[in-house]
Amino acid sequence: MLKTVQNESYRGRLAPSPTGYLHLGHARTFWIAQQRAKANGGVLVLRNEDLDAARFKLEFVDAMIEDLKWFGFEWQEGPDCGGAFGPYSQSERQSFYREAFEKLRAESFIYPCTCSRKDIRMAASAPNAGDDDGPIYPGTCRPKKSGEWQVASGTRFNWRFRVPDGETISFVDGNRGPQQFIAGKDFGDFVVWRHDDVPAYQLSVVVDDAAMQITEVVRGEDLLKSTARQILLYRALGLKAPAFFHCPLLTDERGIRLAKRHDALSLRTLRAQGIEPERLREGWKDET
């Protein structure tokens, strides 16, 4: 049975990254997002999350839109058709992210961190149980008091969000029900702005979802913990968080979740094999 969100102006979104060809796992999550938007009589937004300059390729943007249309997706706003909340490619939205970053810095929610990934992995105090991005940050560069920090000129650093240690972050997921994570235990201080002057995922999606007035975020259940982080960012920026609906992940025959390396299950490959989208969608009707 389709569970709807009580909102007179429902706005959902598809937010693929052009770092490879979309696979069947993306399609199922996106399909659930589209069905929920339709069930609520709402708008579906396509956002091109092209901030990863190291992996982004223009050919993947064109392929992304082509494959989505072939599969049966229909959006009302996006990089190909415009809309009132554009631009719809993240590479064109730097001013939005910069404004949010400056607010976080001015209010001492963030601090510079010179630690590399290797430093964090090797830190003796780093907990063994990692979060979505690896080991939980051990607080090496965290200042004793908010706003009190110094970095030597010319030093490369990221900006981290200082989480309220011990606070329980709770939300009710539209699919998974009540969720709670403890800041500082389940996840640590996280990066919001990278050393190469690019906003990190956590900040960019919060800023964009708020600016585009997204009322419900539908995505994979691997991002449940990220939702707790993002709720902290919404609060720090004085923004209203949307509702969340986290979907089960598709896995391969070995039980490993699908990734863009699974070329055999990419929409492009399946299309070339002459497989119809309707066949691929069999059994998805009860997942929304």
Image (spheres, rainbow, N blue to C red):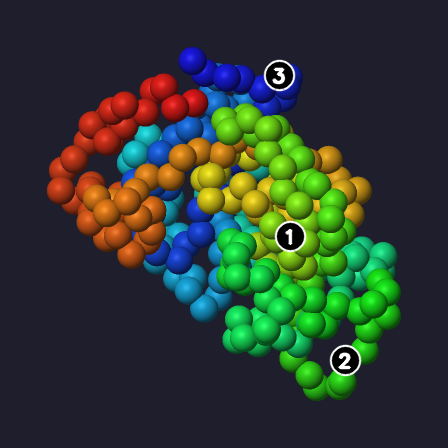
- What's the residue at 59%, 28% (across, down)? 178
| 115 is higher (above) or lower (below) than 22 | below
Picture quarter with the N terminus: top left
Q: Is residue 258 left or right of residue 51?
A: left
- How far across and down, in percent of the image, does residue 231 sit? 68, 42
- What's the residue at 21%, 44% (across, down)? 253
Q: Mark 2 or mark 3, which is nearer the start of the sequence?
A: 3
Single out the mark in the foreground, 3 or 1.
1
Numbered mark located on residue 151 in the image: 2
Single out the mark in the foreground, 3 or 2.
2
Residue bearing mark 1: 185
Numbered mark located on residue 200 in the image: none
Q: Are marks 3 and 2 in contact (CB under 8 Å)?
A: no
- How far across and down, in percent of the image, does residue 28 sit? 35, 34
Q: Indicate the quadrant where residue 287 lies.
A: top left
| 119 is higher (above) or lower (below) than 50 | below
- How far across and down, in percent of the image, does residue 266 sit? 26, 47
Picture quarter with the C terminus: top left
Residue bearing mark 3: 6
Q: Are marks 1 and 2 in contact (CB under 8 Å)?
A: no
Q: Is residue 104 left or right of residue 42?
A: right
